[in-house]
Image (cartoon, rainbow, N blue to C red):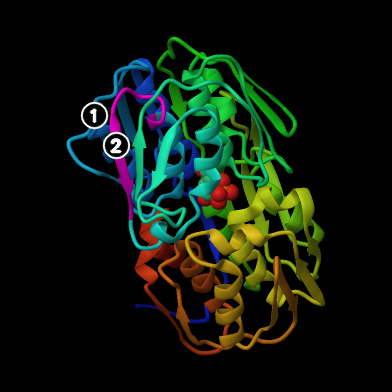
Amino acid sequence: MITCTKSGSLKGEIQVPGDKSISHRAVMFGALAKGTTRITGFLQGADCLSTISCFERMGISIENRGDEVLVHGQGMRGLKKPADVLDCGNSGTTMRLISGILSAQDFDVTLTGDASIQKRPMKRIMTPLSQMGASIRSIPGNGCAPLAICGRPLTGIHYDSPVASAQVKSSVLLAGLYAQGETSVTEPSQSRDHTERMLGLFGANIVSEGRTARIQPASELTAADIQVPGDISSAAYFIAAALMVPGSQLLIKHVGINPTRAGILAVCQAMGGDVRLLNVQDKKGEPTADLLVTHSALKGTVIEGDLIPTLIDELPVIAAMACLAEGRTIIRDAAELKVKESNRIAVMAENLSAMGAQVQETEDGLVIEGGHPLRGALIDSHDDHRIAMTFAVAALCAQGETKIQGGECVNISYPAFYSDLGRLIR
Ligand code: S3P
């Protein structure tokens, strides 16, 4: 249980941990490349450690020196059959991306994970991978993990994905690395493109044209140096806190601002939030900036359509911001929130209501009437890291004490979250 109370202003500088999506991919692609991949700024969160552990169990030597990780890749055919079931922990990215790779190996494997991941939909990857010739089966038969995969030769396909999901797209593209002929994926809205950007750095022939990504089979990938920028999804909590708590100003250093991830910046602008981009850089494939955030009077907005995939993980904290904004905020087209680490639509509605917010749950989002004061409450995080961090921020603006049940789950993406937040409070 974590206890949080109303705070004074937030001031100072913060460097948030490395991007989770990019950290996962750097380990995976490094494992499949020839030579040593050096990763700096790697996120030492439980999810990314699950990815490291899965590849170690498949014979890849990985030196984790803290901020720097060395992956001694064995080439595209260098993975070995693991002695046991592979445990993906709480990490959907690990399970879905690894499934694409493992569908094409010459061994069988079983993938499992924690209680939350065993409820998350895996049919979304089983369907396209099966179309490529993969043998991938939900062992309980309900479309969820554990998954049994028997590696096989694959054939390239064009996949018209019904969901905008980088995990689905990446799983199919990674299988496509091993398939015969071209593989392409078209999405209803463009999801994060870290796979496309990073596989290019490792020498794959991959192109991204708006909502479609295409990959040619590869015979070899080459090791790369990957500098992981700060995770905008982690920065989001500090952006929200600084905008919400009067008198605050924070400088959040070296944050990834890839346009397929940076929707929160557009939302802050629409809400009247003062977020300035300083020191913008675009080297090695992923753009970065320092974000100077100053407390602002916020107003409600509408968040929908193609913007949704660019801020999908930030919607819980955006919903918290909307409670303090003047007027109504509508979040729609976000049904994907229901199949995250928790049902984030229901869990946000339940917990924000407990704090006295005016919030209505809809089929594909939330409607929030801002401007009602928040009060401290007992929050159930449902062991979802993004829910726990959202309510630690909301608590800074609430009258009275907030207790977050299961708040230790921040460990998944941001182990030092509470101490980093505490250090900035004046
Ligand atoms: C991720 C993609 C998103 C996101 C998740 C990480 C990735 O999931 O919510 O936190 O690294 O590809 P979906 O692909 O399910 O949208």
Q: In this view, does 398 lie to the left or right of 382?
A: right
Res 416 visible: no
Where residue 127 appears, x then y in whole percent?
A: 54, 41
Quadrant for the N terminus, please.
Answer: bottom left
Where residue 323 appears, x then y in whole percent?
A: 69, 77
In the rendered image, the vertical position of residue 1 relative to residue 121, given as above or below: below
Residue wearing tag 1:
81
Disc 1 residue type (three-letter): Lys
Label 2: element kind: strand
Disc 2 residue type (three-letter): Val
Which residues fall within the magenta stretch? 102-113
In the rendered image, the vertical position of residue 408 relative to residue 66, given as above or below: below
Residue nearer the viewer, 262 or 58: 58
Q: In this view, does 400 lie to the left or right of 140?
A: right
Residue wearing tag 2:
109
Q: Earlier in the sequence, mark 1 or mark 2?
A: 1
Identify the image quadrant of residue 315: bottom right
Identify the image quadrant of residue 243: bottom right
Q: What whole-number distance in Å separates the C-alpha atoms at marks 1 and 2? A: 7 Å
